[in-house]
Amino acid sequence: MDVIGAAGTQYAKDITLVRNEDITFGTSIYNSNEWTAYPSNTFDDLGTHSALNSGGSHQTGTLFFSEYIEGSSYNKAIEIYNGTGQDINLSNVLIELSNMSISIALSGILQNGDVFVVSHSNADQSLLNAADMITSNLSFNGDDAITLIQNGEIIDVIGVAGTQYAKDTTLIRNENIVSGTLSYDINEWIAHPINTLNYIGFHD
Ligand SMILES: [Ca+2]
Ligand SMILES: [Ca+2]
Ligand SMILES: [Ca+2]
């Protein structure tokens, strides 16, 4: 999802272009303002790239699941936390449920430090009130792997498909977690009793 240059235009001959530090997304049209030009045969920066986030420090993590609710009836919700240091456009972010082969496309901008909540459309009113997205497709029941995908890459996973890992429970991600994991690690979560609904909508 990125382009350098325009076909047929002599935009960068005998030159080294280094993408600016504040760039966090590719572009569909080449924008020379996003690049700094260096003389021919400048190789110093090859093999490294530094990126700034809005806070001015280096990015430390990914989006990750911060809460999982699998309660009674349709009390089902998933919370995603953005602690990356920058606002994230969710248009390239999906939640996938393994057992049902369901894919839920997210949308909107998730600000740094905020959470995005997806609730089942028949959930308790408190989960609907906290929801940024409401869908009947959020139909897991404790043995479904739930995967977070950004730009086509898996960035976090809850559970193991076909394993009864979290039925009738609420899972809260530990405070010290800053990134998703590619395989479920139960030690990163604290389990709460069925229908614990009062942690939804924020993450510490
Ligand atoms: Ca299931
Ligand atoms: Ca249940
Ligand atoms: Ca929460």
Image (spheres, helix red, strand yellow):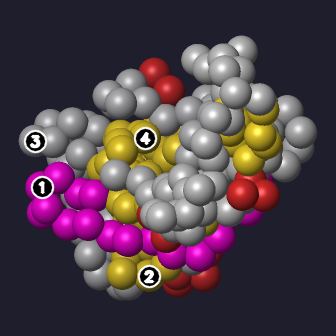
Task: Find disc 4 in the rendering and name its residue.
Answer: 155
Mark 1 residue crowding within 10 angstroms, few (<14) / some (14–19) / many (20+): some
Mark 4 residue crowding within 10 angstroms, few (<14) / some (14–19) / many (20+): many
Task: Find disc 3 in the rendering and name its residue.
Answer: 162
Q: Amino acid at mark 4?
A: Ile
Q: Is residue 45 left or right of residue 62?
A: right
Query: Measuring 84% from the left and 49% from the top, which residue is drawn there?
Result: 54
Asked which secondary structure carries label 3, the reply is loop
The residue mark sitting in front, 3 or 4, is 4
- The magenta segment is 96-116
- Report the Cα–Cα distance between label 3 and label 2: 25 Å
Asked which secondary structure carries label 2, the reply is strand
- Report the disc number at residue 134: 2
Which of 48/89 is in front? Answer: 48
Task: Find disc 1 in the rendering and name its residue.
Answer: 99
Residue 153 in the image: above or below residue 125: above
